[in-house]
Image (cartoon, grey):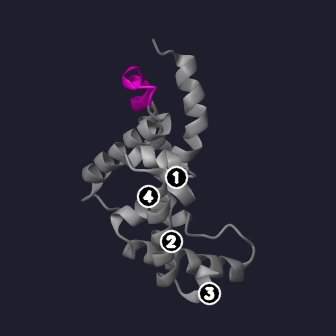
Amino acid sequence: MKDLASFQKYYEEFMPKIFRYVYSKVSDRELTEDLVSEISLKAFEHFESYDEQYSFGGWFYGIARNHLIDHYKKFAKQKHTSLDEIENLVPDSSSPVADTERALKEGELKAAMAKLSDNEKELVTLHYLSGYSYSEMGEMFNKEENTIKVATHRAVTTLRKLLPSHVAD
């Protein structure tokens, strides 16, 4: 029987990756915190169904991915801008030049990422933003580690070609 201590051990190890993954998809800290709370609750409620012969990270990621899909379906037609989102547009730094350069690079990176296939975006996000290893990603997608490594490398190569040279550096 699985207990709270077992779940907590896994949770502490994988929560930062899940948080980065969700944040990379929604780009809003408060929404990310809410979604991660919901995802964590779902994972805890279904922890009994977790099969320890498989990666907890892959299992947890699957819950997160499915929860995000449900979230997008639910709110797809309710696009709005909150006051918090408007406030987040104000830069925190005291250097307007640095803020502008960072914003330009982030915008160009997002635009380039949007041109990748869904699979390529997922691979880049999971490895570089969420910090999953190729081995963990292989378990998530039920593919060999080397296959994931090659596919991720190809996605990054494509992304670099899509970026202006001053951003790819």
Which range is magenta? 41-53
Assign a secondary structure to mark 4.
helix
Residue hosting label 3: 166
The residue sitting at 42% across, 36% down in the picture is 59
Disc 3 packing (10 Å; few <14; some 14–19; many ≥20): few
Circle nearer the viewer, 1 or 2: 1
Residue hosting label 2: 156
Q: Distance from label 3 to label 2 (Cα)?
A: 16 Å
Amino acid type of the residue that numbered disc 1 sits on in the rendered structure: Tyr
Of callouts 1 and 3, which one flags the residue occurring earlier in the amino acid sequence? Answer: 1
Residue hosting label 1: 134
Q: Distance from label 1 to label 3 (Cα)?
A: 28 Å
Q: Distance from label 4 to label 1 (Cα)?
A: 9 Å
Amino acid type of the residue that numbered disc 2 sits on in the rendered structure: Val
Along the line of sight, which residue is nearer the eye, 63 or 85?
63
Residue hosting label 4: 147
State yes or no: discs 3 and 2 in contact (Cβ < 8 Å). no
Circle nearer the viewer, 4 or 2: 4
Q: How many marks?
A: 4
Which quadrant of the figure has residue 112?
A: bottom left
Disc 4 packing (10 Å; few <14; some 14–19; many ≥20): few
Amino acid type of the residue that numbered disc 3 sits on in the rendered structure: His
